[in-house]
Amino acid sequence: MKMKKEASERGSLSGDRVALTATSGFGATSRRAFLGQGAALGAAAAFGGLILPRPARAAAPVRGGRLRMGISGSSTSDSLDPALPFSAMAAVVAIGQCRNGLIEVDAGGNLVPELCEEWESTTDDATGWRFMIRSGVEFHNGKSLEVEDVIFSINQHRASDKSALRALLSSIVEIRDDGARGLLIRLESGNADFPFLLSDPRLQIYPSGTTDFNSGIGTGGYILEVWDPGLRAFSRRNPNYWKEGHANFDEVETIAIEDVNARTSALRSGDVDVINRVERATAKRLDAVEGVNVVVQNGYKHYTLPMRADTPPFDNNDVRLAIKYACKRQQMLDQVLFGYGKLGNDHPIGDFNRYIASEEELPQRRYDPDKARFHLKQAGMENLKVQLYSSDVAFEGAVDAASLYKESARDCGIDIEIVRHPPDGYWSNVWMNQAWCMSYWSGRPTEDWQFTEGYLSTANYNDTFWRNERFDRLLFEARSELDEGRRREMYVEMQRMVSNEGGQVVPAFAADLLGASDALAHGDVAANWDADGYRLADRWWFA
């Protein structure tokens, strides 16, 4: 997967600062005091969409065996340098095997301590933060984990023009060691969700001074022995791994298999134990195969069709609205995703986010030829002809989705010419270059994160080039707003603005599908990223 442009417990206000803490034992859920009880309940409800067609066997983990993973999403140019764009294969090797982050997200959408034992906001406006770095942890090369390693790893992103995290971390104005294993971070403006940013799988921790990132040296459960980009990786269990009950396999072999038929055949024949990106059209048949389970991860991923709002005819909002009303969303959900997902409403916030707008606050947009024609007439373009660039590299079924769109738009007075582009060069030549194309977002666990990366006027990955001063202002205000009711109002207004004025068509949220041998066991599966949050090798085991 191209990582582009890739919950809480109830708490209380205490003393003269906002306390945000996590207990020191690994696996305990963090507390986000200023989010209150409603956020915890909302997060629990949001992840009710996680489906396990057969119950996961969550008995005590068993040590041993070689895990063979057949992974789609790889390239011979892949790198384990997290400041560079990296694929699904690089992700499951880097963060799933070799390295750890400061904080991770569990299956309930909760923040969980990893290399950071606990954290708190040290100011009442969420501009100051303190993170306690875990002691007694060693890198694969024997070096002990220190605060300086964390600072180095974060600053690698802050200094890199190529890192997608540079914009997210740009609000940091000071980062330093407090001398007692505490990492102090000061932000230019308050951010109540800042710890969520540190859960990004690209924010991996490695030794200070690292230059050979492809060696995979980290604090993770496996030590990398082979890294052949686009082909294969091989690692062995780290005998000094600090995380109890994790990294249970003796060895992990990660094999790049791009063709979905070859990947499925390898699972059915027993040549691999688990695959990602199961073909939706055949998922039910695969799940019926003896010895195979299909695990459905409903998460943040959504399919999109970005229109460049700075380019005619999409610089006219009536044209954008006509395009949106010409989409048969339910048809796409049924025929492209085969029911594995949820309807989208032309904004990136889904059922899995805390502040999703309700049906009453923002009614679901539906196919409506009369409204589409009305908006075309308002735009003075009653017969509109546009080009839509598509390729199945954009997302599984993208070409079929474009064909369905073409048919539904015809009755709305819109003539769509589908331009099929080869997979090679699609992301560099089409996305963010052509006026209208097919795309997708893996999604982000907070509204602020998603809006900041993809919708802020100055965002590097604002792929619709839509700019709205009020939206930008609300985004910054909501980021530091600690009143839950007011914060929700602002995020709902932003969803409404994007849906009604923005350049993004979001027909559906798409589930990720894993295919696994029933010899594998696991607990509940996280839905924030593919392959159990990319951490399948760290979290699963052979029964």
Image (cartoon, rainbow, N blue to C red):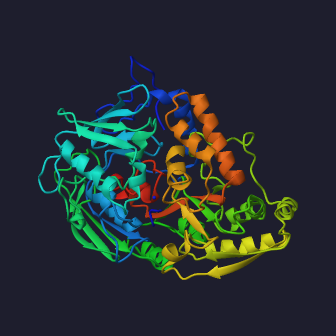
Q: Quadrant of the N terminus?
A: bottom left
Picture residue at 58% right of the left edge, 33% below the top: 487
Q: Residue furthest left?
A: 142
Q: What is the count of numbered marks? A: 0
Question: Taking the image as drawn, is residue 413 in sight?
Answer: yes
Picture residue at 22% right of the left edge, 55% below the top: 218
| Whether residue 3 is situated above or below residue 26 in the rendered picture | below
Given residues 162 and 283, the one toward you in this image is: 162
Q: Is residue 382 left or right of residue 234?
A: right
Q: Dividing the picture into quarters, in which one does residue 310 lie?
A: bottom right
Location of residue 58 in the rendering, given as x and y in whole percent from the top left corner: 41, 47
Location of residue 342 in the rendering, given as x and y in whole percent from the top left corner: 65, 55
| Whether residue 22 is situated above or below residue 519 in the rendered picture | above
Q: Quadrant of the C terminus?
A: bottom left
Given residues 282 and 203, the one toward you in this image is: 203
Picture residue at 36% right of the left edge, 56% below the top: 202
Picture residue at 39% right of the left edge, 48% below the top: 170
Q: Dividing the picture into quarters, in which one does residue 338 lie?
A: bottom right
Given residues 241 and 437, the one toward you in this image is: 437
Location of residue 477 in the rendering, given as x and y in whole percent from the top left corner: 54, 36
